[in-house]
Amino acid sequence: MEKGLAGVDDRAFARVGGGMHQWVLIALIIVAFGYMIFFYSPASPPGGAQSNLSSISSPSFPVASSPANNSFGLAGSSNGSLLTNFEYIDGLNSDLNLFDSWTVLNYIFANLPDRVVVYPTENYFYFRFTAHGYNVKGSFSLFAKDRDTGHFGMGYIVYDENPALELGSERIGNGAEYTDANGVFVKKISDFEYDVTVENKTVKFILNDVGLAPPHSFGLLPEEKYIGTTFDESGLNFFLLYNQKTNRVYWVLDEDVFVPEQFHQYLPEKKLIRGNRTDLVFFHDVENKRKLLVGAKGENVLANNWYDGPFDQMPDNYVKTGKINYDDVVRAYYATGRVDEYLGYTDNPGARIAVAPYTVYFSPDDFSFIGNCMVADKNMPDLGEKYACMTVQQYNVPYDRMQQFLPVE
């Protein structure tokens, strides 16, 4: 996820499926004790006291989701990315004012190439850099719902390489929602191409047109419907499927394209495998040629990083163009009449349905229920029922992890 201020993703805190999950509890603790301290502040006006970059050291830095020279936003079409220790240290010693979002916005734009690719399908452009002795992460946002009216979001926050050190601590962070009224100009070139101008620099943002091709590597069950394909910030593609019989949605790994991950046996007796890089856990259904997502590592979810699962990368661009809709998702989450076309709650602006039908796990014991799902009996008569059993949306934070959120007295 790794949202910045303007891209705060509140859907994980929402009421799901008619019941209040622990997403809500952990959200309240996080907000109360500063795990995700996002300081809302209006953007400094262009030309203000802190918008002059002439005194700011601006070493170049790579942007993880935007390889330079990437012509079409296709995997494998770039020269990759490189961060040297020289650039890292040079950034640490810069005097960038992290308390002023307009200055930071200009700093990032000054270091971007003229053309960048936004891989994640919910249109978050993630970045990381070093400044003033800190590691900083954040994102720009070009949301489907309002980018055509000139809205451009930005948020950033200081982070620690060790996520445990971030818990319960107040951290520097800032951001804003920009429009032409405060000096950021968004121009639509096409459905998947936007020019954004800040001061005298224009950057072309190429959105990821992943397409709407149903899976080829495996067949759909008679009761399954293909909703769409997403590109997660972890670098993995997923198919979002809806089972009409069980009224459930779930994520299946897209193996029709290159999968930049290696897997190892995690709990072989339960047919679970885990990604070496992402720590995402899948039920490996060899017979049906599927890898069904069943878990995201709790530490990654708490760290709000790129490996917290695909719930925050929905295929919104195709909702915007009218090619798909989320009616089946709304049905699965019992949210009819409560959300807009992008799954945003109408009575709680900024919050969306968390399409996270998997377990946030902290130990192998969190998957103890999977064994029951694999038993073929009268309570689990078909494959759809088994998938529904395995994709329960649950987020149970252990007591010792919960204590890390409490402020140090």
Image (tube, helix red, strand yellow):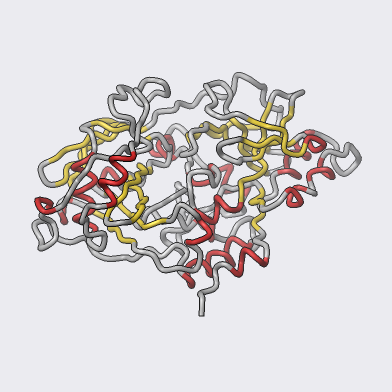
In front of the other: 378 or 64: 64
- For this orientation, the residue located farthest to the right is 377
Residue 259 percent across, percent down from the top left: 55, 26
Residue 40 percent across, percent down from the top left: 32, 65
At x 12%, y 51%, the residue is 53
At x 24%, y 39%, the residue is 60
Q: Left or right: 221 with respect to 183? A: right
Picture quadrant of residue 61: top left
Q: Is residue 324 visible?
A: yes
Residue 213 percent across, percent down from the top left: 52, 23
At x 56%, y 39%, the residue is 278
Residue 199 percent across, percent down from the top left: 12, 46
Picture quadrant of residue 206: top left
Q: Is residue 403 above or below residue 354?
A: below
In front of the other: 63 or 394: 63
At x 42%, y 24%, the residue is 75
Q: Is residue 406 above or below residue 164?
A: below
